[in-house]
Amino acid sequence: MTQPRISYIPLEQMTPEMRVEMERCAREGTPRPESSAVRAHVQACFWFFANAWRDIFKNGVLEHSIKELCRVYVSRSVICEFCGNQRSIKGANEGLKETHYDGLVEFEKSTQYSERQKAALTLAEAMVWRLDTDDAFWARLHKHFTEPQIVELGCAIGLTHGQQSFIRLLNIDHHQVMAGTSASMAPGTETAEALARLKASPDYWAKRGAAPKKNAA
């Protein structure tokens, strides 16, 4: 078991409302309990993320599966293993398959994404890698999304990018808080033992890295 850089707040030190949210994390995942137990050091931070995640990422004016692809794109880019080893149950219910996550870094070259999905991923790419954009970039976004949808997508990407950039530094991992559940875990990570085997594999996604582009498509 790795040693977290910031301790997990025990359930017994949380308010009843926070414990309900922690139970939801264990039951549904994204986020899993560990990151929430870190944010629980500050109740405002705990609820800021829980509420924003519910309202912007899980729900909202844009279909969740689009935002889920962008979330994992961020994981693959910043190498946040904790976040990258999770999958959204709601995203799966909206049609996402594991193969959709495999080609995210090279999404423009892939035939498995729709033009709408690719347009959304270009926004995630531009935000993560701080790429320059032009009129063609924005025309592509406006072709596939309304302005409210673009705003929500940008906010969702910004939320997950900021949190994943922090979480990847914390040395936290799955199956350390409220262990025994596998909700929203990626295939091959459902138990601590399985996760350890995956990380030891030479094909583990976090060992591949990701390279930025100079300009947005």
Image: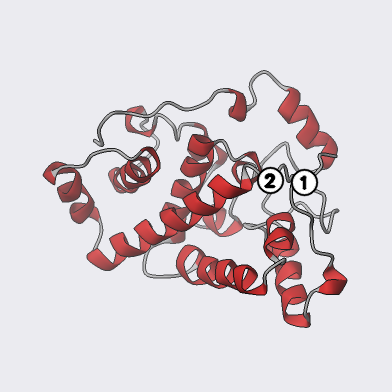
Residue 180 x, y percent position in the rendering: 85, 53
Q: Is residue 213 left or right of residue 133?
A: right
Which residue is identified by label 2?
170
Is residue 206 depicted above or below 26 in this figure? above
Is residue 88 depicted above or below 47 in this figure? above
**Mark 2–mark 1 CB contact (< 8 Å):** yes
Q: Residue at x 47, y 27 (%)?
A: 210
Count of numbered circles on the image: 2
Q: Amino acid at mark 2?
A: Leu
- Label 1: few (<14), some or many (≥20) within 10 Å? some
Q: Residue at x 53, y 65 (%)?
A: 53
Give 137 or 107, whichever is nearer the viewer.
Answer: 137
Is residue 19 depicted above or below 130 in this figure? below
Which residue is identified by label 1?
4
Per the image, label 1 sits on a secondary structure element best described as loop
Q: Residue furthest left?
A: 135
Residue 116 x, y percent position in the rendering: 30, 48
Is residue 35 depicted above or below 48 in this figure? above
Q: Quadrant of residue 33?
A: bottom right
Per the image, label 2 sits on a secondary structure element best described as loop
In primary-sequence order, the first of circles 2 and 1 is 1
Q: Residue at x 68, y 45 (%)?
A: 170
